Image (spheres, grey):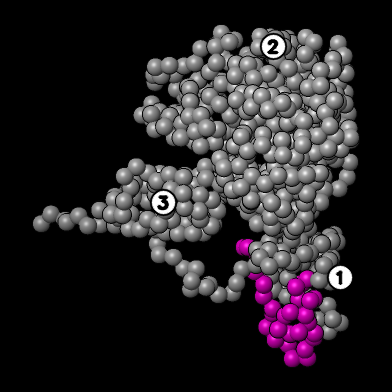
């Protein structure tokens, strides 16, 4: 019997495993990097062992250090979570060689399926070689790992070699394995997967399907179970293929087989030899605890011959610290307050007051609901997210709400991986009422007595007070009775005002805003507002053509041979930033000359840091001489 489990991971999945271990009476051990010293998973564990350093390559990817930590803490079993070393056969062997119990599949099964190229060969699927124009578009993909790392869509043959190199470099950095391969790219297919659970006695459970089609940068955003609208014959084919893959490698434990479905056909993608991020939706539909079952299988216990019967529908939304309107740029900072109320499940690695750093994935939490029907689940999840309190960096919360309410997603007819490519502009439009939230924020501030009127009424009427939040300029003045009158926007009446709560009447409807001010932002209801200063700080002014870091992170690459004085073309990649498991290309905004370059590989930068300057070329047409 397992007595103490070390989780070789961090954040949300570590907290998730700890929760089940506590329910089963199993002690827990966390490992943590220096960047995670105060993290929630460290606080929740019974014991914790430091892995010196901050970068994953120095810490969570060091299998030798993790095994030493388990032995030092007296653990007798290791759960790998997902990501990092979870699909590393050498790590699994090192765990068992140290006399510890490995809560996962046999190393041979990991090796057979962890490489996407070898997994395809096992199922008789050959990778694409000798790519021609007729094969385009194609997808360059890392053979190891996942999460969109080491993945590139190629639509022009001339770009293939460069994207192969870029994908290989990113894969090597993320997974320690630079192998990549090429496969046909299926435009706008559905991403559907099958959850498996296998014991050591030959029983294989296929726990239905999940749809994970709503993705950004090849990373999942919203997942649900069961996958809606699949023809019965196609669903049976998916389940049969998944079971066949598991039996082919003698699989044990939890695993997932992923497919891309298009034109009524299923294309095998890969088998993930671990627990998936989206496993909660399967748990909710089948009424099981997959982590508890992983532990039972690792102890050698047999599964019942058949899994429980499914019921209802479950949907999961991943709440990320990122700005979808700015190319999904990850965000950092203090998560001042985080609360989700209602009959929902929240799996998270953060609590109010925690800091979101630059080293790891920007996912804050997974919010999961279960209901009798898909329609009820959609409404329930959108309602919970709308009313969630998320104070701190920019998040994708509004995008999630808009996605769940979008008729294309609700209808499922056009459900595919191109959803965000088609609808991102609409989905990132600020939710209605932002100008009224700004008015509430201005009045709340004035009610604290910080206006230049001192918060009181003057007999001598002066000009309006002005506050600007984003694009909204709010004008207001104190009234004789101690209240406030809003003059812009028009048609807004202040019903009640206090520093933390303001009620406004808009077109005959009274709306209430909980207002909380922080050093750099104000949160009014579900709206996050940034106050704009009246005057621009001269220190913030930059010369034309300045390229600023769009996010905090690390410079991982600079274009080969790039140097000050080089001529560059508009759209040419100049350097690459990496932060929170995402890679961002910084491109030349226009054709011109590189007059400054402040970036070098390995340099860490804050958001807004000056990276380079491109001086735009003057129009050649204006300089042409007119013939005499």
In the picture, the disc for residue 250 is 2
Q: Is residue 601 visible?
A: yes
Question: Which-is-in-front pick, marks 3 and 2?
Answer: 2
In terms of secondary structure, where does tag 2 sit? Answer: loop
In the picture, the disc for residue 597 is none
Q: Position of residue 207 (x, y in %)?
A: 79, 19
| Distance between the alpha carbons at the discs numbered 3 and 2 | 47 Å
Is residue 383 shown above or below 70?
below
Q: Tag count in the figure?
A: 3
Q: Position of residue 373 (x, y in %)?
A: 85, 28
The reply to whether dot 2 and dot 1 touch (C-beta < 8 Å) is no
Label 3 Cα crowd, 10 Å radius (few <14 / some 14-19 / many 20+): some
In terms of secondary structure, where does tag 1 sit? Answer: strand
Q: Quadrant of the C terminus?
A: bottom left
Q: Residue at x 29, y 57 (%)?
A: 618
Q: Position of residue 455 (x, y in %)?
A: 78, 82
Q: Quadrant of the N terminus?
A: top right
- Is residue 446 inside the magenta stretch? yes
Question: Which-is-in-front pick, marks 2 and 1?
Answer: 2
Q: Is residue 210 visible?
A: no
Is residue 174 shown above or below 440?
above
Magenta span of residues: 443-472
Q: Position of residue 323 (x, y in %)?
A: 62, 49
Question: Which-is-in-front pick, marks 3 and 1?
Answer: 3
| Distance between the alpha carbons at the discs numbered 2 and 1 | 67 Å
In the picture, the disc for residue 496 is 1
Q: Quadrant of residue 499?
A: bottom right
Q: Quadrant of residue 542?
A: bottom left
Residue where numbered disc 3 is placed? 600
| Distance between the alpha carbons at the discs numbered 3 and 1 | 54 Å
């Amino acid at each position: 019997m397992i007595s103490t489990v070390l989780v070789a991971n961090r954040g949300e999945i570590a907290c998730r495993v700890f929760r089940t271990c506590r329910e089963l009476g199993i002690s827990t051990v966390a490992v943590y990097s220096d960047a995670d010293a105060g993290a929630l998973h460290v606080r929740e564990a019974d014991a914790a062992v430091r892995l010196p350093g901050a970068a994953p390559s120095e810490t969570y990817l060091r299998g030798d250090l993790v095994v030493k930590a388990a032995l030092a803490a007296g653990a007798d079993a290791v759960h790998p979570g997902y990501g990092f070393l979870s699909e590393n056969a050498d790590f699994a062997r090192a765990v068992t060689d140290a006399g510890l119990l490995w809560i996962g599949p046999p190393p041979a099964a990991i090796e057979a399926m962890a490489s996407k190229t070898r997994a395809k060969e096992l199922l008789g699927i050959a990778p694409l070689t000798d790519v021609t124009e007729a094969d385009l578009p194609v997808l360059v993909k890392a053979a190891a790992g996942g999460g969109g790392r080491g993945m590139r869509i190629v639509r022009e043959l001339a770009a293939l070699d460069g994207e192969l190199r870029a994908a290989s470099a990113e894969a090597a950095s993320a997974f320690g394995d630079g192998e990549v391969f090429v496969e046909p790219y299926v435009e706008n297919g559905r991403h559907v997967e099958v959850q498996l659970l296998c014991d050591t006695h030959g029983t294989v459970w296929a726990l239905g399907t999940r749809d994970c089609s709503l993705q950004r940068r090849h990373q999942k955003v919203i997942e649900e179970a069961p996958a809606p609208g699949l023809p019965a014959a196609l669903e049976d084919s998916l389940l049969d293929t998944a079971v066949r893959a598991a039996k082919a490698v003698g699989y044990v434990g939890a695993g997932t087989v992923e497919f891309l479905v298009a034109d009524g056909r299923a294309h095998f993608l890969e088998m993930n030899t671990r627990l998936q991020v989206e496993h909660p939706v399967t748990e909710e539909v089948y009424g099981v605890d997959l982590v508890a079952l992983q532990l039972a299988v690792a102890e050698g216990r047999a599964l019942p011959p058949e899994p429980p019967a499914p019921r209802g529908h479950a949907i999961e939304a991943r709440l990320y610290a990122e700005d979808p309107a700015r190319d999904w740029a990850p965000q950092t900072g203090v998560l001042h307050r985080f609360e989700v109320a209602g009959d929902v499940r929240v799996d998270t690695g953060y609590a109010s007051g925690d800091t979101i750093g630059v080293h790891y994935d920007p996912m804050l939490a997974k919010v999961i609901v279960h209901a009798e029907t898909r329609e009820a689940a959609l409404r329930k999840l959108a309602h919970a997210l709308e009313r969630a309190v998320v104070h701190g960096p920019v998040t994708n919360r509004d995008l999630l709400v808009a996605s769940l309410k979008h008729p294309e997603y609700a209808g499922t007819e056009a459900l595919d991986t191109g959803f965000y490519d088609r609808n991102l502009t609409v989905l990132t439009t600020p939710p209605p009422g932002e100008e009224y939230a700004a008015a509430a924020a201005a009045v709340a501030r004035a009610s604290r007595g910080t206006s230049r009127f001192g918060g009181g009424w003057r007999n001598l009427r002066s000009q309006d007070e002005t506050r600007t939040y984003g694009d909204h300029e709010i004008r207001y003045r104190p009234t004789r009775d101690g209240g406030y009158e809003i003059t812009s926007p028009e048609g807004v009446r202040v019903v009640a005002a206090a520093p933390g709560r303001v009620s406004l009447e808009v077109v005959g409807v009274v709306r209430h805003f909980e207002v909380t001010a922080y050093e750099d932002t104000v949160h009014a209801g579900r709206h996050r507002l940034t106050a704009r200063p009246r005057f621009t700080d001269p220190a913030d002014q930059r010369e034309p053509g300045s390229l600023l870091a769009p996010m905090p992170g690390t410079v991982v690459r600079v274009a080969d041979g790039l140097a000050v004085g080089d001529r560059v073309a508009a759209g040419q990649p100049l350097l690459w930033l990496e932060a929170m498991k995402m890679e961002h290309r910084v491109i030349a905004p226009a054709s011109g000359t590189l007059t400054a370059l402040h970036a070098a590989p390995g340099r860490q930068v804050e958001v807004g840091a000056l990276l380079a300057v491109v001086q735009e070329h003057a129009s050649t047409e204006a300089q042409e001489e007119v013939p005499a």
